[in-house]
Amino acid sequence: MSSEFEIIDRYFKKKMKQTALGVGDDAAIINIKKNREIVISSDMLVENVHFLKNTNAARLGWKSLAVNLSDIAAMGAIPKWATLSISLPKINHDWLKEFSKGFFKCADQFGIDLIGGDTTKGPLTISITIMGEIKKNKSLLRSGAKINDDIWVTGQLGMASMGLASLQGTLKLAPSLKVKCIKALETPTPKVLIGSHLSRYANSCIDISDGLIQDLKHVLKASTAGATLLLNEIPCDPFIHASKKYQFALSGGDDYELLFTAPKKHRLTIEKIAKKTKTATSIIGVITKNTSLKVIDQKGKSILFNPKGFDHFA
């Protein structure tokens, strides 16, 4: 039987690109550039809470890192280092090979060094801590939204939650759309490139992991502000508009897109950044003085919506 050290050496030890000391010692050593700060985030994925049993291992490896990268992107930082801790019900070499392949595919694409972690026996649980760099005092916070800021989002919303619903058998989709939605669920693309450019122009930012409404409310609470969203401007698949199943775009979660606010004077600059980084962006509303959140339909009427998104303890 393989030991935890053999598992680490075989599947998770890789040459470092930007780390003084990585996997193999009691702790890692990283070098920080002058006038830079470290941005740190941690996420845990638990089987049957964050992902379904028998999820493809390579896709799970990708997603495990990608969802953490999304947090760093939301801060306007450049991700560089990660630690990975994983508990396994049993040692399955085929699963570990595929999981590590997906993990390092994501790591290589975004320039991440895996610098440490842990393995043990237990329910399938994946915990990653991600670290990035940003210039001092330049991080994007949830608390920075200003009155009359545009509210922007990247990408399309609702695809991942539709993918989950289709896998659970509660939503029927055309085969081609189902494939797209499951891909969005299992292999999200963190918006690292545009995120690293936003700190000069945006006032606040958050990644959309628990649903548009719930995550926007975090920004509004931290900024002591309100918002008006235009339902027709929220980017989502035509299926959502045609079926009026807006709950997937508003409250579905698992999007891992960025929601940010910025002064209107920066619209053209942000559009240029979006084009340069090949990132789809949309203005979906405005920050308001009162602390309420309204969603307005194409007729100008306020609609009722479920204010709750994903709940880890539901």
Image (cartoon, helix red, strand yellow):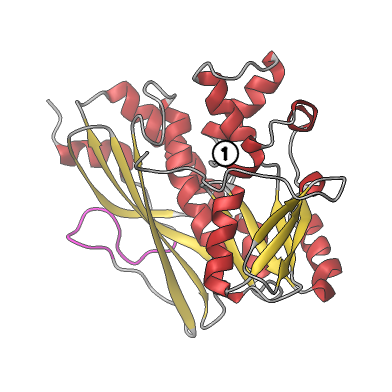
Q: Nearer the viewer, residue 250 or 46?
A: 250
Verify whether residue 21 appears in magenta: yes
Q: Up-down: is 257 above or below 216?
A: above
Q: Which of 279/20 is in front?
A: 279
Relative to 222, is 115 above or below? above
Q: Residue at x 48, y 47 (%)?
A: 67
Q: Work out whether 178 lies above or below 35.
A: above
Q: Amino acid at mark 1?
A: Gly
Q: Quadrant of residue 270?
A: bottom right
Main secondary structure found in the magenta portion: loop
Residue 121 can be seen in this image: yes
- Image location of residue 239, percent across then percent down: 75, 27
The answer to whether 21 appears left or right of 187 in the picture is: left
Query: In this picture, is 314 found above or below 270?
Result: above
Q: Which segment is the magenta one?
A: 18-28
Q: Quadrant of residue 6?
A: top left
Rendering coords of residue 180 (x, y %): 66, 26
> What residue does disc 1 label?
252
Residue 33 showing in the rendered view: no
What is the x, y in percent for residue 188? Answer: 57, 40
Task: Give the structural element (helix, strand or loop) at label 1.
Answer: loop
